[in-house]
C-alpha cells in the first residue's frame, strides 16, 4: 500500500481524466491479498457493516474507531469471535480517527458516523490514500459536496457512497427492465424517504429507539444527533435512499445530470405532537420549535428532460415506503400497490401485479447471491452494497456509486433548504463533473459479480 500511495501522489496531476475512467486501476493490487479495513464509527449502522464484513474470507478488520468505549468493546468482541486478530482501537477524542488513517495496516475505511462528520472524515481518508466507503448522506452543504469531488480528483483515491437501496431486489429488477427498454424512453420518476422515524428521533436515554421523548445530550444513539437536524434545518435532509436508485436508472453523471430543483415544505406539527402525547405538555421538549416541515416535496429536472418528485416524510405516523414510480413512453412501475403496466402486454387500462414482472427480470446479482444475502440486513441489500465496496476496493477501481454521485445526490439537501426558504424558487445544481457527464461511460449495472 505504501507503493500504491506513492503512485497515487505521482498520478494526482492526471486529475479529472484518470478519476473519470471507471476501469482505471492505480497501483498493482494483488486480488489474493486480504483487504485490510478500518471502521470509523461502530454504532448501530457501523456494527451492521462490521458483521457483514466479518463473514468474508477476503478481508481483515485491522482497526476500529469510536468515541463511545462501549461500542469499541462490542466491536472488538465481534471481531475476536469471528476469529480475527484484535484490532487497533482509537477513540480518545473526536479527531483520533486521523491516527487510524495513518496506519499502513489499513487499505480501506468504512465511515458510519453522525452526518456532520461524514465529509471531513471522508476527505481525510481520501488524502491518506484510503479507499473510502461513506454512509449516507455524504454531505450537508454545497461546499462539502465540492470537497468530496475535489479530494477524489486531487488524490486519485476512490470514494463509494454506501447507498444500500440501490441493491434492493425490486429496485434492481426494475433497473434491469429499464436497461432492457421495457418502459421505453424514460419520462418521470417518483421516490423519497417516507418512514415514521419518531421513535428513532426520540428515546429514553437507555434504549436506542423510543421509550421516551429525549433527544440531544439526554438521549443515546441517533436521537443524540439526528433530531437536531429537524430543529435547525427545513430541508430534505435524507434524500439518497429514494433518489439513488432513480439516478442509476436515468444515468445521472453518465450521459445525464440533475439540472434544477424546486422544493416546498408543509407545516411542522408531527414531532411536537409526539412529545406531547408521550411526554406531556409540560415536558421541556414540548417547547422546542422544530424548523423542518413534516412533508417536504421536491421536483428535480434532468438534462434529458425527465422530472423526479422526491418526498421526505419522516415526522408523522405512516407505514414505510420509498414511493418509487418509474414511468416511460411504454408504461410504468409503482411500488405502492405493487403494480406494473406495459402497453401492448398488459390488459388495456388494467394493472398487472408486479411480482411476475419482477421475477422475470430478477437481477443477476440476486439470482446468484439472493439466498446468501437475505439475512445480511435490510432484506439483503446490505450484503450487496458491502460486496460492491470490497470488490471495488480490492481492485482499486471506481465504484458503482462514486464521489460525483455522492455530491450530486447529497446536494439535494442544501438546495432544497434554499428553495424552501425562498418560497419554492428553483435552484440550479452544480455540475460536479465539470462537463464530463456528457462523455462519462454508463456504469454496467447488469452483471453478477458486484
Image (cartoon, rainbow, N blue to C red):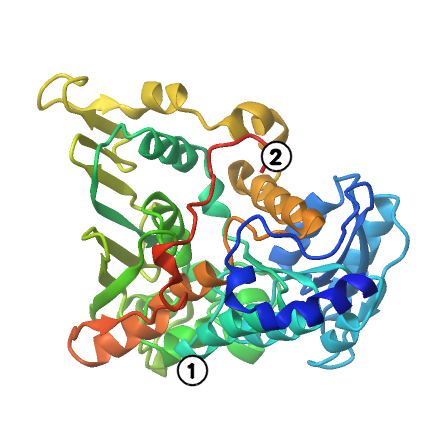
Q: Quadrant of residue 94?
A: bottom right
Above or below residue 351? Residue 188 is below
Determine the residue positioned at 46% across, 46% down: 165
**Secondary structure found at label 1:** helix
Determine the residue positioned at 22% across, 80% down: 421
Tell me where residue 43 appears, x and y as whole percent. 65, 61
Tell me where residue 385 appears, x and y as whole percent. 57, 45
Determine the residue positioned at 45% across, 62% down: 404
Above or below residue 232? Residue 29 is above
- Pick whichever of labels 1 and 2 is earlier in the sequence: 1
User: Mark 1 highlights which residue?
Assistant: 284
Q: Is residue 266 left or right of residue 58?
A: left
Tell me where residue 117 appears, x and y as whole percent. 57, 75
User: Mark 2 highlights which residue?
Assistant: 375
In the image, 219 versus 191, the foreground residue is 191
In the image, 125 versus 149, the foreground residue is 149
Above or below residue 220? Residue 289 is below
Tell me if mark 2 has few (under 14), some (14-19) or many (20+) residues whose alpha carbon lies within 10 angstroms of its own.
Answer: some
Closest to the camera, between mark 1 and mark 2, is: 2
Which quarter of the image is occupied by the C terminus?
Answer: top right
Q: CA distance from mark 1 to mark 2?
A: 41 Å
Determine the residue positioned at 75% across, 71% down: 101
Amino acid at each position: 500500500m505504501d507503493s500504491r500511495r506513492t503512485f497515487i501522489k505521482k498520478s494526482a496531476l492526471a486529475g479529472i481524466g484518470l478519476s473519470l475512467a471507471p476501469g482505471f486501476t492505480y497501483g498493482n493490487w494483488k486480488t489474493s491479498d486480504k483487504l485490510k479495513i478500518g471502521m470509523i464509527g461502530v454504532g448501530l449502522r457501523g456494527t451492521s457493516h462490521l458483521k457483514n464484513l466479518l463473514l468474508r474470507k477476503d478481508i481483515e478488520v485491522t482497526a476500529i474507531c469510536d468515541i463511545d468505549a462501549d461500542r469499541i468493546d462490542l466491536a472488538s468482541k465481534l471481531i475476536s469471535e469471528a476469529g480475527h486478530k484484535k484490532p487497533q482501537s482509537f477513540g480518545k477524542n473526536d479527531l483520533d480517527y486521523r491516527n487510524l488513517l495513518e496506519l499502513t495496516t489499513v487499505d480501506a475505511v468504512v465511515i458510519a458516523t453522525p452526518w456532520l462528520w461524514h465529509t471531513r472524515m471522508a476527505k481525510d481518508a481520501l488524502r491518506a490514500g484510503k479507499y473510502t466507503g461513506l454512509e449516507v448522506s455524504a454531505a450537508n452543504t454545497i461546499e462539502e459536496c465540492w470537497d468530496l469531488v475535489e479530494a477524489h480528483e486531487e488524490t486519485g483515491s476512490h470514494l463509494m457512497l454506501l447507498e444500500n437501496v440501490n441493491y434492493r431486489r425490486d429496485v434492481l429488477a426494475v433497473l434491469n427492465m429499464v436497461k432492457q427498454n421495457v418502459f421505453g424512453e424514460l419520462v418521470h420518476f417518483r421516490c423519497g424517504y417516507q418512514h415514521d422515524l419518531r421513535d428513532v428521533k426520540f428515546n429514553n436515554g437507555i434504549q436506542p429507539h423510543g421509550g421516551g421523548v429525549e433527544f440531544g445530550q439526554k438521549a443515546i444513539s441517533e436521537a443524540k444527533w439526528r433530531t437536531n437536524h429537524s430543529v435547525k434545518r427545513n430541508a430534505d435532509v435524507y434524500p439518497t435512499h429514494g433518489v439513488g436508485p432513480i439516478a442509476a436508472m436515468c444515468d445521472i453523471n453518465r450521459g445525464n445530470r440533475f439540472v434544477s430543483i424546486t422544493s416546498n415544505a408543509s407545516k411542522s406539527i408531527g414531532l411536537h405532537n409526539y412529545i406531547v402525547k408521550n411526554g406531556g405538555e409540560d415536558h421541556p421538549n414540548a417547547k422546542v420549535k422544530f424548523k423542518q416541515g413534516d412533508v417536504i416535496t421536491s421536483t428535480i429536472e434532468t438534462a434529458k428532460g425527465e422530472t423526479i418528485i422526491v418526498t421526505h416524510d419522516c415526522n408523522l405516523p405512516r407505514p414505510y415506503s420509498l414511493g418509487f414510480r418509474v414511468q416511460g413512453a411504454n408504461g410504468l412501475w409503482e411500488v405502492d400497490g405493487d403494480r406494473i403496466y406495459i402497453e401492448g402486454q398488459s390488459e388495456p387500462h388494467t394493472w398487472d401485479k408486479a411480482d411476475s414482472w419482477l421475477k422475470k427480470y430478477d437481477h443477476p446479482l440476486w439470482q446468484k447471491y439472493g439466498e446468501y444475502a437475505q439475512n445480511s440486513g435490510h432484506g439483503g441489500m446490505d450484503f450487496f452494497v458491502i460486496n460492491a465496496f470490497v470488490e471495488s476496493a480490492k481492485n482499486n477501481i471506481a465504484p458503482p456509486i462514486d464521489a460525483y454521485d455522492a455530491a450530486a445526490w447529497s446536494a439535494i439537501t442544501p438546495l432544497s433548504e434554499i428553495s424552501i426558504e425562498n418560497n419554492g424558487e428553483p435552484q440550479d445544481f452544480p455540475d460536479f463533473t465539470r462537463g464530463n457527464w456528457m462523455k462519462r461511460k454508463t456504469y454496467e449495472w447488469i452483471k453478477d459479480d458486484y
